[in-house]
Image (cartoon, grey):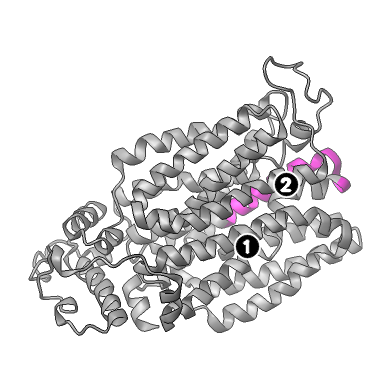
Amino acid sequence: MISSNPEQNISIQDSRNAKLPFYCAILTLLVAIGGFENGLNTGITNIPEQIIRNCSNGYNHVQGAGVPDCLPMGDLLWGFAVGSHSLGAIFGGLGAGSLQTRFGRKKSLIYNSITWIIGGILLGASVNPVMFICGRIFTGIGTGVGSVVIPTYLGEISTIKSRGLIGSVYQDSVVIGIVVSQLVGLPLTFIPGWRILLILTSAIAIFQLVLIPIIGVESPRYLISQNKIKEAKESLQKLRKGYNIDLEFDEIIQGQSEQQINETNIENEKYVQHSLVVTDDQVGIKKPPSFKELLQNPYCRKMLFVCVGTHLAQQLNGIQSIVFYSTAIFLNVMGDSAKYVTIIIGSAILLVTLTSTFLIDRMGRRPLLLLSEIGVTIACFLIVIGSIYKSNVLLIIAFLLHVTAFSIALGALPFFIISEVIPTRFVSIVSSICLGTNWTLNFLICFVFPMMMDALKDYTFLVFGVLGVCFVIFIWIFVPETKGKSIEEITSQN
């Protein structure tokens, strides 16, 4: 129950001014393990590619009994095997909205750990390409679900002052996972070391599966949307330990209630007065909204366009081509040194991503997103020039510029901007649409890129450069600034 006097206990600091309470920080790091799994499984096939699919022993059991030394695959089959991770993520992303609406954010995270456990076991014990692909699909489902639920959860538990920081933790953990997959993959590029590398996914997921039920809490905003007011306040108080949560809790209630009033045209003053007492019976549970309801809401329709656009910008700039195929791209010009360049690129992504984490709440979302898109667009054109004139130095500079610019904002912002601009009631359906689109493009680019390189050769990244110009214009015109505003404040102002 909300206090009838939100100004009481003024000796305790207002939770709206909290930066990053300890428990909230611990929970953020625990949940971010899912992002680490995403990155790990994204980059895990990059460096050990040749030893997995092209070793001299083939299906023979020279180095170990029971499993073949490697899994021979041609270019097309290998492209599909790598891309099947994204294929699984499409289904995971599309189903995640319904999952987190029905079972809640916390339970969805717990259930999702199981997909990574299954996927890792299938990958590590693969005896043929079919089993390998099935493992990639399972880890992809986990990645797809995680890419919806994790940013939603982090956005809903974060404080106003740390929302940018906490929101970017997901992308930070993804990048850390990519870099770790490359660093660990280098010494494990042997038979059967690659199997150890692949089964790491299961070990990490088991760790998360054990801890989340013990120390995790459900999102207060989700609990309110399910009419569990008492549990919501207890959850928020645990997340803001040491702070007075009365005013923040009132604002969350007010924001969700006003949204329901606007949707149903019910004039009910008890939902919009801070001084009133709110009980469990006074906030009704609404059934999950349909896509038709989403489109009928002018504000949500506009923000859906913005959110989908930012996810298109994230994928259609060539970054996945670099993450999945950087070793193959550099192999022709640098030989065995290609894998070391891949690690350098991954480390650059990590360094800039961690740095940008502290800029998001200072510079704002929109300026960083513009800077990021302009940077990757310039880099795409430089890659084309470097390819035409066979300049290895220019190519390395261009690739580093690309991943650096991408890491500034394009990597993180599309994921957590959804929970910033979309009302809680519609977050699940919008997340599913955006992440379904995101992972569909991820799969198509991963699968098609080798053919693009074969057909367009030096001009491959020209396609991404032209698209980048379009996205710069899109961001400039349509993307709003959300820095320093509560979720309820943002939705009420647009």
Task: Give the camera-side residue of 302 and 217.
Answer: 302
Task: Give the camera-side residue of 283 and 388.
Answer: 283
Residue pictured at 53% horizontal, 65% vertical: 434
Residue 280 sits above or below residue 176 on the image: below
Residue 201 visible (yes or no):
no
Q: Going from the N terminus, do you reach mark 1 or mark 2 first?
A: 2
Mark 1 is on which residue type?
Phe
Residue 395 sits above or below residue 266 on the image: above
Q: Position of residue 276 (x, y in %)?
A: 10, 74
The boundaries of the magenta stretch are: 332-352
**Which quarter of the rendering shows the C terminus?**
bottom left
Q: How far apart are marks 1 and 2 (CA)?
A: 25 Å
**Mark 2 Cα shell of 10 Å, populated few (<14), some (14-19), many (≥20):** some
Residue 22 falls left or right of residue 167: left
State the SS at label 2: helix
**Which quarter of the rendering shows the N terminus?**
bottom left
The image quadrant of residue 59 is top right
State the SS at label 1: helix
Residue on which the image places disc 1:
406
Mark 2 is on which residue type?
Phe
The image quadrant of residue 82 is top right
Residue 478 falls left or right of residue 83: left
Label ID, residue 160: none
Q: Position of residue 397 (x, y in %)?
A: 76, 59
Residue on which the image places disc 2:
80
**Closer to the observer: label 1 or label 2?**
2
Task: Give the camera-side residue of 315 and 469.
Answer: 315
